[in-house]
Image: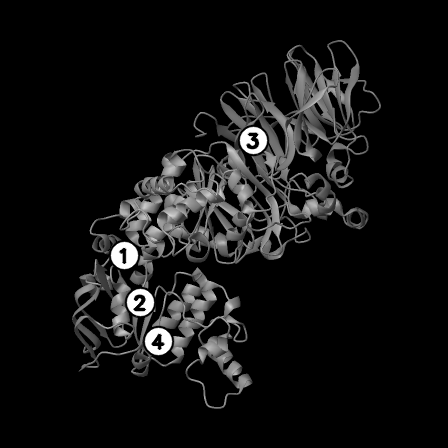
Amino acid sequence: MDPIVRLEDVTKTYRGVPAVKNVSFDLRKGEIHALLGENGAGKSTLTKIIAGVVDATSGKMFHKGVETAYASPHAALEAGIAMVFQETSLVPSMTVAQNLYLGTEKFLNRLRGTYISAQQFLQSLNFPVDPNAMVATLGAAKRQMVEIARAVHHNAEIIIFDEPTATLTPEEKRHFFALIRRLKARGVSIVFISHALEEALMIADRITILRDGELVITDDTSAFDRDRIVAAMVGRSLSGQIYRQRDETKLRKAGKKVLSVQDISMSNIVRNNSFSIFEGQITGVFGLIGSGRTETFKIVSGIYKRDFRRGGAIELDDKPVRYLVPSEAVADGIVYVTEDRKSEGIFETMGIAENLFGGLLAAGREKAWVINQQEMRQLSAEWTRTLNIKAINDNARVVELSGGNQQKVVIGKGLVQQPRIVIFDEPTRGVDVGAIAEIHQIINRLADEGLAVVVISSYLPEIMNLSDRILVCRQGRIVEEFSPAEATEEKIMYAAVH
Amino acid sequence: MILDPILDVFRGKAVTIPPLDGAFRPNTRLDDLPAFAELTEPDNLLAADGRLLVSSGNAVLAIASGSEPVVAETFPSPVSALALSPSGDLTVGLESGKLLIAGKEVSLPAEIRCITALAYADDGMLWLANGSAQYLASQWAADLMRKGASGSLWSRAVGGDFRKVAGDIAFPYGLYPTRGDVVVSESWRHQLVRFGATGNHSTVLTHLPGYPARLSPAGDGGAWLTLFAPRNRLIEFVLQETHYRQDMIDQVPPAYWIAPALASNRSFLEPLQCGGIRTMGIHKPWSPSRSYGLVVRLDRAMQPQFSLHSRANGTRHGICSVAEKDGRLFVASRGGDCVLSLDLAAGGF
């Protein structure tokens, strides 16, 4: 079968550093092609070349057999190539419908007609998004849905999805995969970038794996299994570390009960939620988006307030606590490592040292008016080494780091506060496989050192691999507790949904 | 915060139910056990003279492995408590408020009408729990719904008369004599309280996730605690709603009250929470049930070590009594109509 897009020996360099090196890649008509690799492997760069976002430094691109190079994403879109970006490119101050038709408006627009047509279109995709809603008010998952809908709306014959499922719930993922299959049946070719290997194995026809900017392998999906993919991605097998089987004897025993949450409520998001957290143990919390798991732990760490009247009780070391601001929780040794590192976790344009030092300032361990630069550098050097943060130097700007290393900075910022309870919210979201293993090691080490650790995750293999006990959250409360030795994905998902 | 005591007046008192985790972590151990004997609503268990005695209705039966229960003795009204004196006399409390020692009726003060538990100390002192001043032992649900706290604790020294040790107890249901004192399970306040011979008391274990029933000595100096029903949000809510509760008591048959139960899901007329209980034909083990099976192992300091459960979707509910004998734990399930047997050595605790 002739490929619809073919790249020959494509290279792209940034300031002399190659992001993609001599990669030859082809995409067939009507196929789903998964592109896998660690952060920095060159996946995004390769697809951006196809979509006209960046130019190739050398090499050739053929679209329908004709050599071409698109000067802009608009030109690529005109030619039928659309890209759905990981960071959504929607206009937050406009409605969903307006975003959907942005750039394709008619000379005279009837607003009502636009909304009706947007409503019908979103319904046809099974996306539960209100076309009248302002994009700024939507959560990450719904924004992603609008972004996908926009690409589909342009009737593109090639659609590139960059991490489309990272923010979707399992239910939404199912709808998304059904949509992809429908597009495939219509002859649309799809490039699918994902960190979730199971998704690639489930949906793709072929898989291409990149490592350090070079193509490692392209083959039919049937030729792959998870171990082979991981080995190709990182050059070694990590499956024993990331997806190990747990048995009862290897689970950590619960230490002293440090935190007891009893019937806390916050509006209709957290409802009579009760659980305990123990020292020396990793408590995994699984739940679908909207199940109230993040909000529950934000209440615990003083970021959100529980209901004023009959909001329940939180006891730390058997003493009731009610935090007005997060710094009070930090002072009591409770640290929350956010799921949204870009907006809540780091100061992007600052250096590693400044970010880590910010953690000390937040905990009140350092005075803001006298900053000892040498001490700051020492702190940075120490934690860069401890957490194995890979950067040009100890005070490289965080924005220049890969997702995994940014996450390690966020974790480091929390750990410098010397916590007793560490709450990790989606600790490996948007992080590549190699960094996942390292972050898991850090989390395990903290539990081994006797800290009470909570890991909130929507990624079931992560929950099952890390946790010594698994709590399942549904509709604002913990409904079930499993031992990882007895838990299966089906059991956990049933509890999370029903 | 310094203002919390003032703000708490406006916040209202939060009734919180402790989660089932830590030593109370749910499991299916009670449901996994084979039935040692099957009989209707077994209540009290007692190891006596090498035999295992169990009360069921008006009878006390002897049960043994591989044979049908044998009636040892029958009484004019249901048996509500059993104990064995150091000299081997079987002591039986009856629903009618009578107390029999070695078959002879003992005169009791008029206040004692609801014998829920009996226990002998090593020195022969007999402790008696009188659950309620208004209701019979079988009417415990009414006492809870009326927020009763009229229970009392009595003791009788060898050859002496009964003496009231303490009153205003919210349904004392279990007794565990220890070093001159007695630990009492106070059901409606979800706690264990230690009483001295003079009535001085201290709380031993509080904030239990269910209603504690009888206590039984364990082999190594600790104790076994049974909890006959779970606390749940709906029942706590009903307990706060005085008028609703009064209407329910007046108009609804007791079996269908929104109240704890020894067994549930036997009739469609019982209070349901629809999809909260059963979804797609599966009875969810974590659903908010009226009945539950729970036995807790306490250490010498009366702190929970581990527990055995029959969850919302199980059947071995309403555990009111256990007995340890020859390295085995026997569990009487009133809701499950059976006595269970567990090998403690092979229990994997």
What mark, if any, has residue B296 been given in the picture? 3
Q: Quadrant of the N terminus of chain B?
A: top right
Q: Is residue A99 above or below residue A349?
A: below
- Asked where in the image residue B97 lies, by quadrant, the reply is top right
Q: Nearer the viewer, residue B193 or A277?
A: A277
User: In the rendering, at what x and y percent does residue A469 appear?
Assistant: 45, 41
Query: Which-is-in-front pick, marks 2 and 1?
Result: 1
Q: Which residue has dot 4 on it?
A: A183
User: In the rendering, at what x and y percent does residue B249 appear?
Assistant: 79, 46
Give the color scheme: rainbow, by chain, secondary structure or one colour: one colour
Does label 1 lie on the same chain as label 2? yes
The residue lying at 43 percent from left, 42 percent from top is A371
Distance between the alpha carbons at the discs numbered 1 and 4: 27 Å
* Disc 2 secondary structure class: strand
User: Callout 4: 10 Å neighbours few (<14), some, many (20+)?
Assistant: many
Q: Which residue has dot 1 on it?
A: A38
Query: Which-is-in-front pick, marks 3 and 4?
Result: 4
Specify the amino acid type for callout 1.
Glu
Query: Which-is-in-front pick, marks 1 and 4?
Result: 1
Q: Is residue A316 visible?
A: yes
Q: Chain of mark 2?
A: A
- Asked where in the image residue B291 lies, by quadrant, the reply is top right
User: Callout 2: 10 Å neighbours few (<14), some, many (20+)?
Assistant: many
Q: Is residue B54 visible?
A: no
Specify the amino acid type for callout 2.
Phe
Distance between the alpha carbons at the discs numbered 2 and 3: 53 Å
Q: Which residue has dot 2 on it?
A: A192
User: In the rendering, at what x and y percent does residue A83 appear?
Assistant: 33, 73
